[in-house]
Amino acid sequence: MTLEIRKLCAGYGGERVLENINLTIADGEFVSVLGKSGCGKSTLLGALAGTVPYEGAVLCDGFPLCGPSETLIYMPQDDLLFPWLTVLENALLYPAVHGKKRENRERAMRLLREFGLSGYERRYPSKLSGGQRQRVAFARTALSPAAFMLLDEPFAALDPVTRSELRVWLQKQRSRLGKSAIFVTHDIDEAIEITDRVLVLRGRPAALDGEFRTDDPKARVRIFEYLHEK
Amino acid sequence: MHTSRILPPIFVIIGVFVLWEALVRAMDMPSYVLPAPSAIAAALGRDFSALAKHGLVTLGETGFGLAFAIVGGVLLAVLMDALPSFRRAAYPLLIASQTIPIIILAPLFIIYFGFGLTPKVICVALMCFFPVAVGVSDGMARTDARLMNLLRSFGAKPLRLYVLCKLPAAMPSFFSSLRVAVTYSVTGAVVGEWLSSDSGLGFYMLRVKNAYRIDSVLACVLVIAVLSLLLNGLVRVLQRICIRY
């Protein structure tokens, strides 16, 4: 599946935050959107998730998407686990919303095992560490049928050690997740480590005006210089 | 429960009873004015089978009334949460309904529904309905908006939003309000029995009062207090079972 964003403009209360965003994401590709705090990164994901109104077009394999859809799944900054649900029930939240909890139970158990959460299925989120909670949130995201994940700084609320552990973990889990992703972050290292392409969002209203391949050995320096040039 | 939490109230109760006993004996108080705690304990033992029989009737009325109050209170809270205009219209009436003492309404229920179980159940339901409705409504209003937005982004319909998020989020408030409601509930049944009944603790209390057996009246009061405390404890146990996180 290919996701195409064409001439997307979005904002709040008459103020335009994003201007003319064009982006194409190929099947299985991880793309990061990098920018300073408040530049409109989360607004972009909000527009794609259907919670922020926008102009322009979002197409999946050429078909337009509008509002919350089964193609895109949003994962917020905080893990937002439901405190009254167990780890397994939290992971099964998307199927539960669509009345398909039972048929996804085995898949959820397998995924939790693969995510290193075996034995934690019946625990409540309050009994988990920050890293474990975030892995449950990833399992919840993975258990949706959506082909594209909208990851809104998923490691921002974690301590530096857990954060670097989860970066390595996510790299390893990419194939298991079997999804494409738009990964919003303001951390250059995180963007390079996890994704295939880095897009820079800057200006007011913000536009995507820089693109870098992360397999370039000088990507870090190039992105840094680009972010700090006038 | 820790002994440090149990012991202080036990000591206070024992202290009050010892003082009471001593005062009654020292002042040679007649038992039809104020019986000593030892006389109340004797009455409790003597009347135990009658108290148990009437207590069960009161407990049954309380149970039915509470069940109606819980169902009605939760339904009204959901309606008020889902329909803000309904909330604006119903909330003042709900508050106003609590300003009318149940003892004034109870005779009307007897006129409308006869002398059977129904008027007592309505008394209990009316007394317990308000805390449940307000507690659940406030609990749902305090639901974390981010959780609701996450469910909406998953494509959740309104019914799923309530089942998966709003109602579970309101559970702690529901149990807090239920603890208040069960404390009122036995009183509601007894008030109903005072006005017209041929069984129940209210009926028994009137009968022994008319015979000037104040020790038996106070034994009955003790049973009512114990029933209220037991129901309160039952709610706590249910809360621990239902809210494990």
Image (tube, coloured by chain):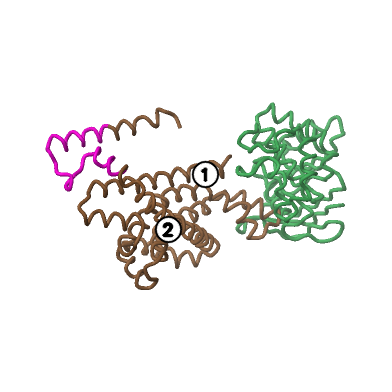
Chain colours: A green, B brown
Residue A101 visible to the viewer: yes
Give the mark nearest the N terminus, 1 or 2.
2
Stretch in magenta = B15-44
Quadrant position of residue A178: top right
| Residue that carries the numbered disc 1 in the rendered image | B239
Quarter of the image with the N terminus of chain B is: top left
| Residue B68 horizontal/vertical position (percent) | 48, 60
Give the residue displayed 75% in from the left and 50% down from the top: A102
Q: Secondary structure at mark 2?
A: helix
| Residue A94 horizontal/vertical position (percent) | 72, 50
Q: Is residue B23 magenta?
A: yes
What amino acid is at disc 2?
A: Glu
Chain under disc 1: B
Q: Secondary structure at mark 1?
A: helix
| Residue that carries the numbered disc 2 in the rendered image | B61
Q: Nearer the viewer, residue A156 or A88?
A: A88
Q: Nearer the viewer, residue B45 or B24?
A: B45
Q: Residues within 10 Å of mark 1 (few under 14, many from 20)?
A: some
Residue A225 visible to the viewer: no
- Foreground label between 1 and 2: 2
Q: Main secondary structure of the magenta part?
A: helix
